[in-house]
Amino acid sequence: MEKDNVSKIKKSSSDLSRFIEFSLGSEDYAIPLLMVREVISVPDTTPIPKSPAHFLGIMNLRGQVISIVDLRKKLKIEMSKHNKEEAVIIVDVGGINIGVVVDSINKVLAFSPDEVSEMPDVENQINTHYIHGVYKKESSLTVLLDIAKVLDIKDLEAIGEVRKAA
């Protein structure tokens, strides 16, 4: 009987999804932890002329050129007035490392798929194709982002051009 309980616990812990939770403005968002390479403080960047407003520029991270995108500007979210500490999450999107600026890093979440709700239907004018779902915490919600869809094809092509030029 005890073996069954242990195997259930092991099975349930392996079914847990792990996400890194961060703040943008006054809301909490999360991306899969497996996509995260590292978290760093906001670096000095070299701006690239004629790039989109959310594209802050490029940086050198241990010999690798990394493009930096301000996720707040990309998603049209006001910067938090009570900004704790900006950070850059280096994510691997299709083999390309990209830095995304967030207001603060909150914690690592671990939850089972049944704790995630689908995004409720909203007006057609709001683009929500980049949202996996919503994780329900005790008293608040965390939006689970598909970072590859947030950084759409145009952004990835622009980043590719910058990498070629660097």
Image (tube, helix red, strand yellow):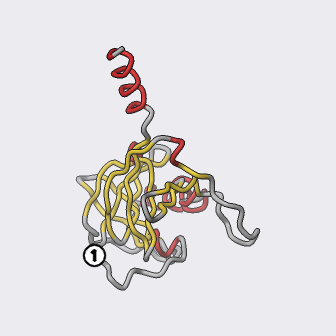
Give the SS element for disc 1: loop
Residue 130 point in image, percent of width and height: 60, 57
Above or below, comparing residue 76 to residue 151 in the picture: below
Instruction: Give the residue at x 45% y 53%.
Output: 31
Q: Quadrant of residue 79?
A: bottom left
* Kind of residue at disc 1: Lys
Q: Quadrant of residue 163?
A: bottom left
Foreground pick, 12 / 25:
12
The residue carrying mark 1 is 84
Work out whether residue 133 or residue 127 is closer to the camera in this orientation and state it. 133
Residue extending farthest to the front is: 1
Q: Residue furthest bottom?
A: 81
- Image quadrant holding the N terminus, namely top left
User: Where does residue 23 sit, x and y in percent of width and height?
Assistant: 39, 68
Please state the horizontal and vertical placement of residue 88, each as a whole percent of the image.
Answer: 33, 63
Name the spot of residue 159 as percent of width and height, x first: 49, 59
Which residue is depicted at the point 27% across and 75% down?
A: 84
- Decide: is 46 above or below 18: below
